[in-house]
Image (tube, rainbow, N blue to C red):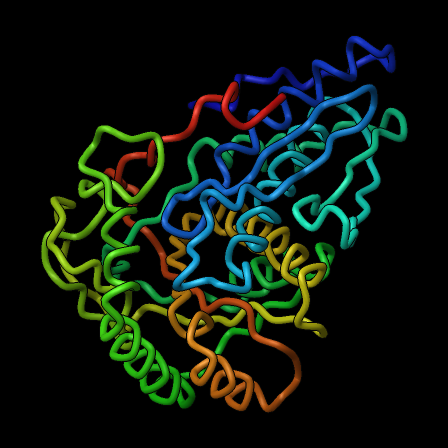
Amino acid sequence: MTTGNIPARTVPLSAGATWNALHQAATVAGNAPSIHNTQPWRWHVSTGVLDLWADRDRQLTVADPAGRMLTISCGAALHHALVALAVQGLGTIVVPVPDPRRPDLLARLTVTGNVPITMASIALLDAVSLRRTDRRPVTGEPMDETTMLAIANAAEPQGAFLRFLGPERVPALATLAASASAAQPADPAWRAELDRWIDSGASDTGVPVVNIPGQPVRTPVPERDFGRPGTLPMRGSAAGAAVYAVLYGEEDDPAAWLSAGRALSAVWLMANELDVSVVPISAITEVPGTRRGLRELLARIGWPYLVLRMGLTDPRSRGPRVTPRLPAEETVR
């Protein structure tokens, strides 16, 4: 699925025009990153309003029983929708909806009026169609501080923070990742759940084998072992040039996880603009013990949501394929 080639023009505030704009935005949101490409969201469009719902049928009930990663994934989709609306000159307000009677209703987005269209919003929408998870090693060129600052600054307006870890903290992060990677596969139910979301190419969800490296990636911090080799060609390893960052926030509840997802999307799209690859390492925050350890590594400045591996990409090298997407008619109504 593409972004729909939304033109950068101001949408009039008529009921029909705003309904179409919201539907287009929800369609664009289908490109958002999600845990194992589960795409666990549903959208409901009405006059001037777009409601975001969790789709529990696509929740990882073993790896993610609390719905933490599901909600972060939905938050990323929410930010993608906001990017699409900004390019159409529509201002919005977003209100989380913590309604115990409707726990799957995560947020309500309401159009407030027209706003100026900026070059920054156009660049972000362009990045939506180019964004993907590239699990290959990064190039040997290190990221400079200006690049890291620009990426980190993208998180805060969305309600979360991104902290890059210094080299001295990477060994401790690697220990946490190794502990999580050892704990999860020991559970047969966890392994069976992961297997269900590895796709041979016939599904609109899941992680395609063509996006999984054909051999283990040697990086300082262990990454997801999918239990089988994929077919993604490998380029030369430059593990020392990878940097690691932690997405974190002040609270540890569904509203905070939704903000974390918005921040994840903002960070990833900014990284894409700067030719920086992003690989989420969620195992550390999926396992309660290692999640607590990660909070200690952050000196308890906040609650960790996700670890990201980043590095510069080789512009001469073709990246992995875009993962499959559910058709809009299955996620938008």
- Identify the residue at horizontal 31%, vertical 63% (top origin): 141
Q: Position of residue 265 (x, y in %)?
A: 56, 48
Query: Along the line of sight, which residue is nearer the eye, 284 or 155?
Result: 284
In the rendered structure, the answer to whether residue 80 lies left or right of residue 38 reads right
- Against 41, residue 62 (above or below) is below
The quadrant of the image that shows the C terminus is top right
In which quadrant is the N terminus drawn?
top left
**x, y percent for residue 206:** 32, 42
Does residue 136 appear to the left or right of 285 in the view shown? left
- The percent position of residue 324, horizontal first and vertical second, equals 34, 31
Does residue 133 sit above or below 164 in this rendering? above
Depth order, front residue of 290/276: 290
Left or right: 41 with respect to 272?
Answer: right
Judging depth in this view, the residue of 249 and 147 nearest the camera is 249
323 vs 104, left or right, is left
Question: Residue 211's image quarter?
Answer: top left
The residue lying at 55 percent from left, 84 percent from top is: 295
Q: Position of residue 202 (x, y in %)?
A: 23, 28
